[in-house]
Amino acid sequence: MPFHVEGLVAIVVFYLAILAVGIWAAWKTKNTGSEGDRSEAIIVGGRDIGLLVGGFTMTATWVGGGYINGTAEAVYVPGYGLAWAQAPIGYSLSLIVGGLFFAKPMRSKGYVTMLDPFQQIYGKRMGGLLFIPALMGEMFWAAAIFSALGATISVIIDININISVIISALIATMYTLVGGLYSVAYTDVVQLFCIFLGLWISVPFAMSHPAVTDIGLTAVQEVYQAPWLGSINSLDIYTWLDNFLLLTLGGIPWQAYFQRVLSSSSATYAQVLSFLAAFGCLVMALPAILIGAIGASTAWNETDYGPPDPMTKKEADMILPIVLQYLCPVYISFFGLGAVSAAVMSSADSSILSASSMFARNIYQLSFRQNASDREIVWVMRITVFLFGASATAMALLASSVYGLWYLSSDLVYIIIFPQLLCVLFIKGTNTYGAIAGYFFGLLLRITGGEPYLYLQPLIYYPGCYPDENNIYVQRFPFKTLAMLTSFFTNIIVSYLAKYLFESGTLPPKLDFLDAVVSRYSREHMDKATLVKSDNIVLNELAPVNPRHSLTLSSTFTNKEAFNYVDSSPDLSNTEDN
């Protein structure tokens, strides 16, 4: 395949457009608010993201390279098809559930990152532990984006896919440094427009190619491969349900999602944004589904791609750019591929910024450097952007499937963070002891279940497991949901058991080494940096909040329970001595 100068020009043009919007948004951020809260302006955008821009950016957070390429891949792969393309429905339901139950309590309390409630209730140690799966989730997501982008560029200009992944990652990482959430939000508007226009323009041309059979026929009949509608065997139904619950519930506790929720101008806006994004995800999945179906309906030996087909060449994960390249006219394919390339590039900054935000605030500032200046925090964020970008790049180079990266990115988040988030927001009385126990029980069950994408053999062989082509055993039993439920109930049981043992006097107060029951508000809880300024918060309905840093207890918490505990203890020093 020759080197396409036109394709390279198209990519450069779209990249420059995205970069220009990012620089403009960064300039807008710099001229918004005071210098003293620059780090929080980067993280939550001054909490004044409106309904229109917010709806676009929350939709674009999910509709990136992994979403469109992964959906097209799942529809195309023989034996899977549309029945196994769970991400569009799964993530749309995830946004609906998040909007109904999680957006309002998180926004009402004025948190800055997703990890704030964990550190408020469970302490900085637990916040550090939960940062690990949150970071890994964001990195897997970014890796899926880089992988999709690298595949797209390699099709356009015919360079090695590994080189294209590395170059793409460098561009996206550099771009992330331009600005914070404002840059991400406004480039997401351009991104969504590019995907919508680029893909929908390409679909009619691809469908009308002489080598493409009617997709209505190939949906139910085997022509070149198994029907693209796909089917679910009775043996695989539990695996399907396990993965579907993973995408639906595991799609909620993400910093990338809550960053948009927490940047909304009100709690109600945060909910509305979630519902708008759910609808947007479904709409944006349609062209990707059609392109996957077109790929399954094509006689590839009648095209310039030539035999064998993409599946035989093990290029199924690149089916979307391949369809655009070989089934569309040159000017259409270059526009579509250029638009999609620029669009998926701008998705990467969201995950990298999310990971950097959590580290800078919840690990560096709240755990180690409570007195760190705002300038110092901003520089920590910039450094970690490079580190996390490099990590995501390495994972993108090692993973074999975009869709596999998707499942991995939600795995740890679903099993560890989701049950912890349920407990910290809705189960009164859970504490650090229960959180730690639930964390490790869930992690243990997940690891012992094995992972074919990492070539990790299981230690526990659940009913129905079978060896794949690499002789790695694959579980049919819904062990991921089992691990999540185990983590959830372990947290509750151990928390209430610890509370009973300490409050009944069965265990002496000195054994409460985590200060989770007897000494709940000891020095560890007194030295946390600000979460919100309490007198700016109206819990029923929030006006736009402009938080500022402070080290006083009253401005640290907006949790009513926390205030009640403090008010009922006239002498905090006695509590510490215990």
Image: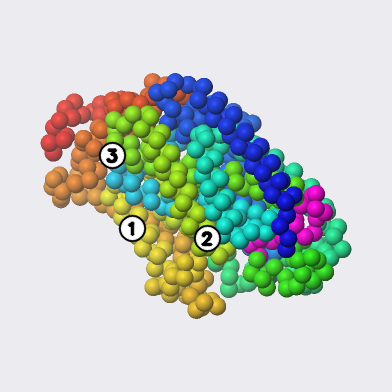
Q: To which residue does mark 1 refer?
A: 440
Identity, as a three-letter code, of the amino acid under mark 3: Phe
Q: Of the numbered discs in the image, which one, if any, rests on residue 354?
A: none
Horizontal side, residue 140 vs residue 198: left or right:
left
Is the Cβ of the residue at disc 2 closer than 8 Å to that at disc 1? no
Q: To which residue does mark 3 refer?
A: 368
Q: To which residue does mark 2 refer?
A: 397
* Viewer-side label of 1, 3: 3
Q: In x, y percent, where is residue 359?
A: 39, 42
Disc 2 secondary structure class: helix
Disc 3 secondary structure class: helix
Q: Quadrant of residue 315?
A: bottom right
Task: Point out the tag, 2 or 3, that comes first from the N-terminus.
Answer: 3
Disc 1 secondary structure class: helix
Residue range highlighted in magenta: 316-333
Say if residue 44 shows up in the picture: no
The residue under the point 56% across, 37% down is 184
Horizontal side, residue 146 vs residue 327: left or right:
left
